[in-house]
Amino acid sequence: MSILKIAKIGHPILSKKAKLVDKIPDSSLNNLVKDMSETMLEAEGVGLAAPQIHISKQIMIFRIPDNNELENDTIEVTALINPKIIISNEKTENQWEGCLSIPGMTGLVKRYSEIEYEGLDLNGKIIKKKVSGLHARIVQHEFDHLNGVMYTQRLVDPRAFGFAEEINKYWKDKNEKN
Ligand code: NI
């Protein structure tokens, strides 16, 4: 296993729509997902999409660690390939997000509160889930990466973005509950 280099905002691969994976199962895909997991865990992230490690393919991984502030249920590292999202409810919520491709920064982003997603696991088996809260938010964030969209394109307000250090001091609590 190895830790991969993460593309930073400004790199054109982050603005490209990723290609569908056409061969599943595939041992090289398994190895890639292992490396992505190691890279994400080392960087203490909760999600990572293949374009972020310079591979323009529809692969994302995510997890919900047990120390998260928003909900109690934890999710082990999950790989989702060729995902689709269905919006089943128009309700949205605003929350601060970060991204391993925009280190040190945070922004207030509007997302759907509840989504349904469908994709394949590493064996080619269909994963289909209706989720809410942090789980729904992470999947929407990673799904955006597969479509060349960064969270900075979805800010609630262009000013609601900056270094986490400053935002924590001056913004949080005041603005996140709208
Ligand atoms: Ni990201």
Image (cartoon, helix red, strand yellow):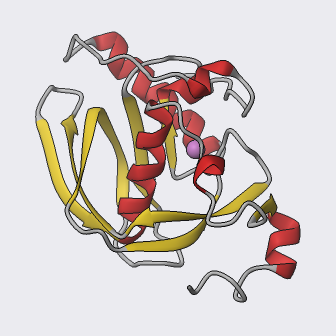
Q: Evaluate whether residue 67 shows in this view.
A: no
At horizontal 45% and vertical 63% (from top left) the residue drawn is 111
Say which quadrant the C terminus sits in.
bottom right
In front: 1, or 43? 43
Ligand 1: which quarter?
Answer: top right
At horizontal 29% and vertical 68% (from top left) the residue drawn is 90
Q: Picture coordinates of residue 120 (x, y %)?
A: 19, 33
Is 139 situated left or right of 83 in this image? Answer: right
- Residue 106 occupies quadrant: bottom right
Is 146 situated left or right of 12 in this image? Answer: left
At horizontal 29% and vertical 12% (from top left) the residue drawn is 27
Q: Evaluate whether residue 90 shows in this view.
A: yes
Say how many tags the image has.
0
Q: Picture coordinates of residue 4 (x, y %)?
A: 62, 24
In front: 58, or 76? 58
Q: Picture coordinates of residue 79 (x, y %)?
A: 33, 38
